[in-house]
Every structure is written in structure tokens, then in C-alpha cells.
Amino acid sequence: MLNISSLPWLALGGLFQLFGFGRWTVPAAAWLAPLFLLRFVRLEPTLVGILLAWLALFISLSIASRGVIPVPGAAYLGVTAAMAASTTLPFLADALLAPRLEGFTSTLIFPLAWVVMEYLSARTNPFGTWGSLASTQSGNLPLMQLASVTGLWGINFLIAWFSSTFNWAWEHNFQWQAVQGGVLLYAIVWSLVMLGGGLRLVLAPSKTPTVRVAAIGWPEDILSMGDVMGVLQPNPSGEEITRTRASFQRLHDWFLESTRGEARAGAKIVLWPEGNLMVFAADEAAFLERARGLAWEHGIYLLMGMGTLHPNQQRFLENKAVLIDPAGEVAFSYTKSKPVPGWEAMASIRGDGRLRTSESPYGRLAAAICYDMDFPELLRQAGKAGADLLLVPASDWEAIKELHHEIAVFRAVENGVSMVRVTRWGLSGVVDALGRPLAHMDHFAADPRVMVAQVPIAGLRTIYAVIGDAFAWACLAGLVTLAGVAII
């Protein structure tokens, strides 16, 4: 039976979840939402508590994710309902197992279950780490350094453990004699994480070589998506193809001339956003000749976000990042491995899942494309390969511009690479291998849309790049062990 006096904790948990992830992410809210929801579930019969916690999460996520998750109509509610359901699983595990364990050990069930839930979700669903509790902490640089050891999973554990530790102390009426051991243990672990992160920041080399990088944004007045969609329909007319080819030509000229200007200003690496260079497959070779000549003429590396179109094919879009070196040669061509679920996934020729790297005077260069950055196991290839500079063409929309950039920053920290991310219809940014921001450009505010930065080119080797998701697997082993103890 519902305990009316516990409803304020449900309301507070739902309220903080509005700001826990989505359009209005507030880092502190991500710590407080699970705390109050856990308090509510523990005061209620298990079934009632879980169902109402799911309802609160469903309502909050549906409001906060409007415009963030690009799914229409009833399908959108289905996605948020599934997200709410997966998020309630750690609460269910806590309700079933924690009361069977003695003392402070019981506080471990909730964080272990949270890490396992997020990790398995990230590896099995098409949305990757989207919605991760840890990704809300972008900007907390000392805490973010934990990702270089454990990935997101250690940060998730620390936040969730705070909720269960606080509730454990709450259930003991905050009597210091009864809770001091557990509270001090959590405080020591939290302090060591923050101290270690702070030391990593202050002890990092300060005099590292840099390279001038220019990121060129999307011009709004040359090509509309309406110009493109006509030739993507079955059997486009010759007139449509001719008209669109002329629009593509103007776009090519603009990007090449903008690149020439940045090269003359001293840029050694220039990159373009995702799919910005639209070209028919039949015209790709001719365009590449122009781009190769420009790179050779000015002695630059040119990373092009290209959208090569194959009309009349079921999968008509090749979404590529093509790197041309100063000798005018194609250093690598990488096809996006993780197209966004929905239209892009259905239309795209999928890549082989292997990131490309290239040696250069500015360190080892690597590239990934937009949504690839939501998948840590894919981006870990850059860390394992010893990449120094990660170049990321991307394309977003206004509702997710900060959120998606912040998610990408964690991949730089995990793998110890400086990152230059240039985004059409979003937030472009440069961070170093510690996640420290060096430059940014908002597509909706910048004019001209060019971002220039001196980017450090000495990568940092990280533990995470070596051991990968070992911490998440350790959490799975810990949860299974404690579940066995609780059942016995």
C-alpha cells in the first residue's frame, strides 16, 4: 500500500531528473535525482515503489528529452518508456538485495547495478552511452579524469554510491556513531578521486608543441536540404541531377576557397563538418583532384567530411572522413561506423568499424564521425593506436548542441587525445587530452563560421586505453557475488 508521506521524495526525484539529462542538464541534479528516488523506493513495497519510480522517470525523461531524441510520435514515448524502465533496474536490484546484506556492504548493490545496467545498455542498444549519468559531469575536470582509468563506469559508480551511502546514513537517522565508518570510507574514496584528478591536471606537461588548426563551418546560403532530397528519390530526373550538381559545385568552391584562406593565414590542419561536402559518386574523383591539389599547394592536412551520394541505390549515402596529406595524397578514408538510428541508419553505407590513423609531423592523427563518439569501445581504438589528435566532423541540431559536444569530450579524456570537433548546426569545440576547453564556435551565433586554435599535439597514454571496460566487468562480478551472498 502506498505510503503518502514518501511522495515528496518521489516528486523531488522526478523534479531533479528533469535536469539530470536532456535539454536542461545540471550536473548537481544528476547526483540528487537517484538519491531521492532511492529514498522513495526504499520506503514503499517493492512493486509499488518501482512502478511509481518508473512513472516519475518516464514523465521526466519525456519532457527533458523532447527535441533531443529525434524520434516522432508514439515511438518517442516508447523510447523514453524503455529508458525509464532500464533506469529503474538498479532500484529494483537494491530493493531485492540490499535488505538481505548487513551493514555498509548493502550500499554497494545500487552502484554496482547502475554500472552494469549502463554498460550492458551501451553495448546492446543503438544509442550507445546516450543518457549516461557520467556524461552529465562534463566540466568537472578533476572528476572527469577518472574516465582515463575506468571510463564512464567509475564516475557512474561514484555518483550512484553517493545515493546509497546517503540513504544508508538516513536510515540510521544520521547518528554519527552508527554511520561514521561508512561515511568516512565514501568520503575517502571521493577525495582520492578528486585529488588524483586534480593532480593529473596540475602535473600534466604545460609546454607541449601545438599546431594551428582551422575548422570551417557550414554556409547556410548555398545549399538547402531540399536541393538534395530531390535526387535521393527513386529515378531522379536528369534535370534534378543537373540542378543539384550545380549547387554542389558552388558548395565545393566555397569550402575550397575558405580552406585556401585559412591555409594562407597559417593553418596546418583544416577540417570540415560531417557530410558537408556533398558530391555525386560519379563526380567524386574529379573533386578529390581539386582537394588534393589545394592540400599540396599549401602544404596542409585537409580532413573533409564528405557525403558521397549514390542515386537509385537503397543505401545511397557514404558518410566519410577523408584525410589528404601535404603531398596531395589520400592518407585515409574512413566511413562512419555508427549511423544514427532511423533515417541515417537506413540510408547509409556502414563502415567496417575500424578507425583510421595517419602519422604526421603533428603527431598521429585519427578521425571519427559524430555519432561514433557515443561509443567508447569504438573510440578506444584511437587510444590503443597511440593517437595524439582526434579530428571529428559532426552534425547536430540546436537542442543537443551542448549535450552532444560534452559527451564527445569524455572520449578525449578516456583516450588521452586532443580533440577538434567541427559541427554543422551545433557546437564546435577544441579540447586537450585532459578535456580542458581551448576554443568553441556556436553555429547559431558565429559569423564567419570559422574556429581557429593552437592545439596540443602530444597525446597522453591512459590506463583506460589499455584495460578498456575492465571496471565495468569487475562491477558485474561484484554484483553477481553480492547477489549470491544475499540469496544464501
Image (cartoon, rainbow, N blue to C red):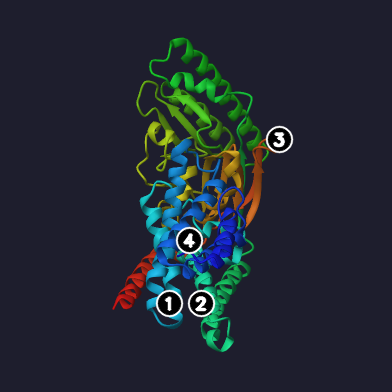
Work out which quarter of the rendered image holds the C terminus and state it.
bottom left
Q: Can you see residue 127?
A: yes
Q: CA distance from mark 3 to mark 4?
A: 35 Å
Q: Earlier in the sequence, mark 4 or mark 1?
A: 1
Q: Is residue 172 above or below residue 450?
A: below
Element carrying mark 4: helix
Circle 3 sits on which residue?
A: 447
Q: Are marks 3 and 2 in contact (CB under 8 Å)?
A: no
Q: Is residue 474 above or below residue 407?
A: below
Category of crowding for the residue at label 4, using alpha-carbon neighbours closer than 10 angstroms: few (below 14), some (14–19), many (at least 20): many
Element carrying mark 1: helix
Of 307 and 36, which appears nearest the observer?
Answer: 36
Which quadrant of the structure image shows residue 173?
bottom right
Q: Earlier in the sequence, mark 3 or mark 4?
A: 4
Q: Residue furthest left?
A: 488
User: Which is closer to the viewer, label 4 or label 1?
Assistant: 1
Q: What amino acid does circle 4 point to?
A: Leu
Element carrying mark 3: loop
Q: Indicate the position of residue 203 as horizontal and vertical percent values.
A: 61, 70
Q: CA distance from mark 1 to mark 2?
A: 8 Å
Residue 207 horizontal side relative to residue 347, left or right: right
Q: What amino acid does circle 2 point to?
A: Trp
Q: CA distance from mark 3 to mark 2?
A: 53 Å
Category of crowding for the residue at label 3, using alpha-carbon neighbours closer than 10 angstroms: few (below 14), some (14–19), many (at least 20): few
Which quadrant of the structure image shows residue 95?
bottom left
Circle 2 sits on which residue?
A: 168
Q: Indicate the position of residue 339 as horizontal and vertical percent values.
A: 42, 40
